[in-house]
Image (cartoon, rainbow, N blue to C red):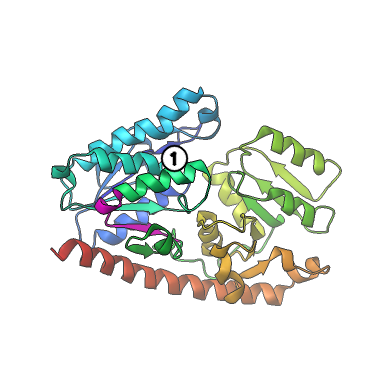
Amino acid sequence: ILIADPYCSINSNGEPSGHFIHFFKDLKNLLEKDFTVIIACSQEYQKHLSGEFVTVPSNPSGDQLKKLSRLSRLSVLNIKPFNTARKLLKLDADAIVFQACSLPALSLSILTTRRKFTSGKKIFLTIYKDQISGKNMKDRIRRVLFCLAKKRVSGIITGIPELADIYQVMTLAIPDYFSRTPKSITEAESNYKYDIAQLGIVNEGKNVERVVEIFKDTDLKVVIAGRFNSDERYEEIRRSIRDCSNVTLINKYLSEQEYQAILEGSRFVILPYETNKFQSSGIYYEALLSLKPLLVSDAPFFRNVTANGLGYKYDELLSNMTEVLRNEEKYLAMQKNIYDYIAHIQNDSKDRILSFFREIIRKE
């Protein structure tokens, strides 16, 4: 099995960007119990991994990407991954698991690679959000290209079960992290700098304005930490909290150490995702693995949060939210629920992943 990232996003510090590298580790560690596993990734990624590698180019992210001309961004985001994916498809492997990148680039690479290289090869795409069901032009283009390539795609791997009906292919629905041991309650941090943390890149899919609206000028200490992808939006938020002492704004790409320090030093993690989109969240699992209860939107991905006692919907918090969020008895109960939930879904996911690949790869 070849696990491949045709993009390999690198931040300004020359380090892997995002949680994709954790997916590499988890999937490799699990699959190598039954299969020979090779990872196709850049040299920057290889520093954090072990095993046999195929080296592919890395690409910029964030501010580095924004500095490029429109034509250069098109090349970096689509043409380079397209060329890399085509080269990887020609390698001798029973199966290829492509990490999420440009869906048009992956679809076109599959369509334009000669059948002698793809015939009999199991091709899987990792997808973190719905990219094809919208009515906008980008979604329409992605939908057409994916539908054309679908005959050569064996399935998708996703954290969103609903995508099975949208993409109409075999689907393995698993969490973004499935080979980690959650902290015990005694190991979890108990001295908190913040009551609530919003972490990660602030893009158009995260309603940071709602976070500020609900929690500014309360007794709760809030931190919003992560690079804004819009300078204009950052300035608007900064002005809105100018006279507000309980909200801290950190507009930068966080190092792993900075990210972990804020995560561990916060009681709750808030995930203000758009409610009308199907998408998963790496931060969701990272928070739960650290036994951090969640404050979430009504987005479909978060349906298990209130059902399993993992946190609250922030729009349903009452006027006494400070009292509710600082209630130690309820907090410890949620931490126990989180531990049980994570332990269950991880064990279940490992079994389903191995069964999935054993059946598909060996049935021939």
Q: Quadrant of residue 338?
A: bottom right
**What kind of element bears circle 1?**
loop
Q: Which residue is mark 1?
A: 16
Check the picture and name the quadrant holding the C terminus: bottom left
Residue 216 placed where, x, y %?
81, 52
Q: Is residue 152 magenta?
A: yes
Image coordinates for residue 9, horizontal then vertical, percent: 43, 38
Q: Residue at x 70, y 38 (%)?
A: 233
In-front residue for pair 266/322: 322
Magenta span contains residue 317:
no
Q: Is residue 116 left or right of residue 279?
A: left
Image height of 285 relative to 99, above or below:
below
Residue at 38 percent of width and 73 percent of height = 348
Q: Is residue 327 left or right of residue 350?
A: right
Highlighted magenta segment, given as a residue range: 149-159
Q: Position of residue 146 (x, y in %)?
A: 36, 48
List the single residue furthest toward the right: 243
> Amino acid under label 1?
Pro
Of 185 and 53, the residue lying toward us: 53
Q: Residue at x 19, y 47 (%)?
A: 118
Callout 1: 10 Å neighbours few (<14), some, many (20+)? many
Quadrant in which residue 190 is drawn: bottom right
- Is residue 54 among what the camera can see? no
Q: Position of residue 295 (x, y in %)?
A: 66, 63
Q: In this orientation, which residue lies closer to the viewer: 132 or 98? A: 132
Numbered circles on residues, count: 1
Residue at horizontal 50 percent and vertical 73 percent from the top: 341
Would residue 258 be found to the left or right of residue 141 on screen? right
Residue 19 can be seen, yes or no = yes
